[in-house]
Image: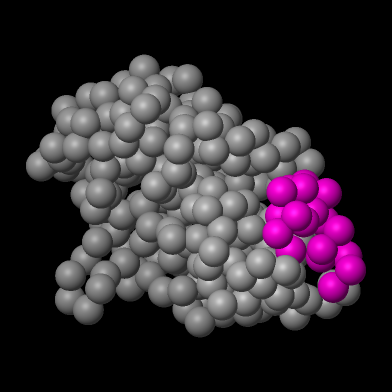
Amino acid sequence: MRAAYEEVEVIHGIDATFEEGVVTAVLGANGAGKSTLLALAAGIMGPSEGEVRFAGEKVREGSTASLARRGLCLIPEGRGVFPNLTVRENLWVMTHSGSARRHVERCAFERFPRLEDRRDQPAGTLSGGEQQMLALARAVASSPRLLLLDELSMGLAPIIVDELYNHVVQLAAEGITVVVVEQFARTALSVATSAMVMANGRIVQTGAAHEVESVLHSAYLGTVQPAEVGSAAPDGLSNPVDTGSGAG
């Protein structure tokens, strides 16, 4: 698959599969193509070459609503909550999939009791961690088959990140397929079963999470040759890999 923004190609011939019922970490420095990969998977943009398939059916650009009804849910970078709506009203957005308000609230509040205490509070007044919990709770209320998470940890304290990823582990245990795009690499690898590293629009390493972690530093610095797709090694990566307390 290839993808471009106007005339500038940003995804250079990649081939990826996300296995059902596992957590896959997609890692890489800024500009590697991670968020574009999620946009393609979610039908926000279309490939310039090749195709994307979800549950055997072709994903088309602009098909986000139908994909959501089929069980694909994206939590974008920046959380995507409606700041002027209350916590409950944010959850009610998910009733478009046919779920009753009571069901949506019960699913959310059982998993995130802190949100129930703030159910009538505008989402914009929540802490960053609580807003991310709300985004995650809203997604889970739609009973997704595939959950795409873009930079779940951005701007959050490590203790909150750990709490959120504990929920990710639970979701996978319940049979939900989860794809996590992260710069906090070792945080994501701690909960992932499989992983891939992207650089300059290519996949340069894939494998089990523990295998990818062993070469992660070299991959971020651009010294690992592409393991699966592409013929050119990544270059120009200056962002250091995180050690668990910061992101590159």
Does the rendering let one see residue 83? yes
Residue 104: where, in percent of width, then height? 81, 65
Give whichever of 21, 150 is nearer the camera: 150
- Residue 84 covered by magenta stretch: no
What is the image's colouring?
one colour
Q: Would residue 70 be found to the left or right of residue 100 on screen? A: left
Does the rendering let one see residue 94? no
Can you say whether 20 is above or below 245 in the image? below
Residue 245: where, in percent of width, then height? 37, 27
Can you say whether 65 is above or below 25 in the image? below
Task: Name the residue located 71 percent from the left edge and 55 percent from the top edge.
Answer: 115
Q: Would residue 216 be found to the left or right of residue 223 on screen? A: right
Give whichever of 181, 199 is nearer the camera: 181
Q: Quadrant of the C terminus?
A: top left
Residue 192: where, in percent of width, then height? 55, 32
Which quarter of the picture shows residue 182? top left
Task: Name the residue located 34 percent from the left edge and 23 percent from the top edge.
Answer: 243
Residue lying farthest left? 236
- Residue 116 covered by magenta stretch: yes
Residue 79: where, in percent of width, then height? 50, 61
Q: Would residue 222 be found to the left or right of residue 127 on screen? A: left
Q: Would residue 245 be found to the left or right of residue 125 on screen? A: left
Residues shaded magenta = 101-119
